[in-house]
Image: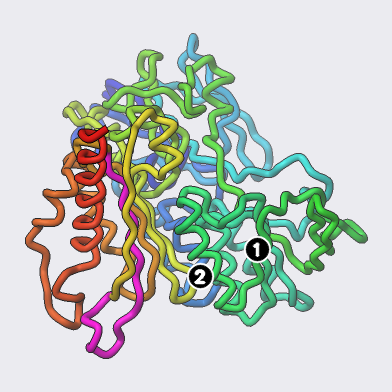
Amino acid sequence: MVNERLVVVGGNAAGMSAAGQARRRRPKDDLSIVAFERGRYSSYSACGIPYWIGGEVTSMDELIARRPEEHIRAGVDLRMGCDVVGIDLQSRTVEVVEVDGGRRYAEPFDQLLLATGSTPYRPPIPGMDAPNVHGVQVFDDGVALRAELEGDGVRRVVVVGGGYIGLEIAEAMKRRGLEVTVVDRSGTPVGMFDEDVGGFIADAVRGLGIGLRLDAPVAAIETSAGRATAVRTEDGTTLPADLVVLGLGVRPNVGLATGAGIPTGTSGGIAVDQRMRTPVDGVWAAGDCVESMHRVSGRRVVVALGTHANKQGRVAGINLGGGYATFPGVIGTAVTKVCELEVARTGLSEREARSAGFEFVTASIDSSTRAGYFPGSRPIRVKMIAERRSGRLLGAQIVGREGAAKRIDVLATAIWNEMAVDEILSLDLSYAPPFGPVWDPVLVAARKAFAAVEDDIIAASGS
C-alpha cells in the first residue's frame, strides 16, 4: 500500500533529479512519484541547444540524457504533454491539462515539488509575437528555430540581446553562414562583466564578423504579412531580418506558485530554505524558478543555470527520500564562448560589489594561455576584484582564446573558500609549457591584485 504521493511539476534537470533521488531512497510501495512535463522532451541539455543549431552537435539525440520511458522504468510515472495550470493547497491537488486534447483532471499530492524553470523575457514591443521571432529556452524552442533555419529564405538574422544566450546563438548563426547582427541596449555585451572587460568582448565579437550594435534599445519589430522583416532601434536604425532570435535573458517561472499563494522572495524567485523547502508545508521547489543565496554578497539571487538546477533537484530529492542535504548557495560562476572567444566570470562584478557595500581594488593583466614560445599560445586577460584591507577575492573575469576560460574554476574555488589574493598567488598550480607560462595568468593577476591591496593600505596609513 502506498503511504505517500509526490507530484513533480517539470520534467527536466531539477524535477527529474529530485524524482530520481527520492526514488532511490524510497521504494514504490512507500512513495508514489508522478511527474508532469508540458513539453515533448525531458531530461535534456538546454545549454547544448545553440551548439545543435549551429551544427557542432550533429544530432538532437545527443542532448537528451534520459528518455521518458527510462524514467518510467525507474519507477517515476512521467506524463509528457501535461501542463499543470493550478494548485489547490487546501485539497492538496494540482489541476492538469493534457496539451493534446485538452482533458482536465485533478491529481492529488502529499508532497509537491515545483521545478517550473524559467521563461524567456519578451518585452512589450510591437511585432514580438511574429512567428519568426524565436526565444531559445526549452528543447521545443530549439526544434522550432532549427526547422525555420532549414527552410528557404533565411539569410539575415538579428539577435536581440547580447548576453550569454545571445552570443551563443550569434555564433550558431555565423557557423551556418548567415549574416548576423546582435543588438543590445547596454554599452557592452554580456552585462554581467565590467565595462573594461566587456569592451574587449565587443572588439573580439566584431572581429569574428558578427555585427554588434550597442546602446541600442529595440523600439519595434517591423512586420509584413504577419512575419518579422526588420528590427528597429530607438535611434531610428532599421536592421533587415529574415529571422529574429531573442537573447534577452529569462525570468523565473513563478506564476503557478504565486497563483497558489506560495511566497516568492526579494529576487522574484520562489522562496526556499537550504533544504529547498518553501514556507508552505509539503511544498518544495528547485531549479531556475527559485532564488538562492549569493555566498559573497549575502543577497538572494536567481541564477538560471543547469548546474544549480541539478544540484538543487538532488538536494530536494534526498530530503524527500528521507535523507538530509542542503544547498549552500551560489557565487555566479559562468562560462561561454563565441567561435574562438572564451569568456568567464565568478563572484561579483565591480557594479555588484559596489551595490553590496564592499570597498575594493581591482587588477587586470594580459598574458598567454601557454608559454610564449610554445606553438598555439593565445592571449588571455584576467581581472580580479579584491576587498580593501583584507584582500579577500570578491570576483574575477577572464577573456581569451582556447585554454583561457576554464581557469575561472580555480578562482571560483578560491572565492567559495573565502581566500585572499595573497593566498591565491602562492597556490601550487600545475605548469608545463603546453598548458601555461611558468607564472600562470591566475597567479600573475593575484600578484597584481595583492600589490593593489598593499598600495591601498600604505596610502591609507599615510593619509
Q: Which numbered marker is on residue 182? A: 1
Label 1, residues with CA under 10 Å away: few <14, some 14-19, many ≥20: many
Q: Is residue 257 left or right of residue 177?
A: left
Residue in the picture at 55% in, 21% down: 258
Q: Position of residue 240 (x, y in %)?
A: 81, 68
Q: Check the picture and name the quadrant holding the N terminus.
A: top left
Q: Can you give x and y, in whole percent of width and height, for residue 327 in the image?
A: 26, 33
Q: Nearer the viewer, residue 357 or 40?
A: 357
- Say which label, 2 or 1, has the lower sequence index: 2
Q: Is residue 345 above or below residue 359?
A: below
Please tell me in which quadrant of the rendered image residue 456 appears: top left
Could you tell me if residue 417 is visible in this image?
yes
Residue at horizontal 43%, vertical 38%? Answer: 352
**Front-most of 133 and 205?**
205
In this view, the residue farthest toward the top is 90
Q: Is residue 198 above or below residue 51?
A: above
Tell me which residue sits at (54%, 69%) in the image. Answer: 203
Counting from the top left corner in percent of width and height, residue 27 is at: 21, 34
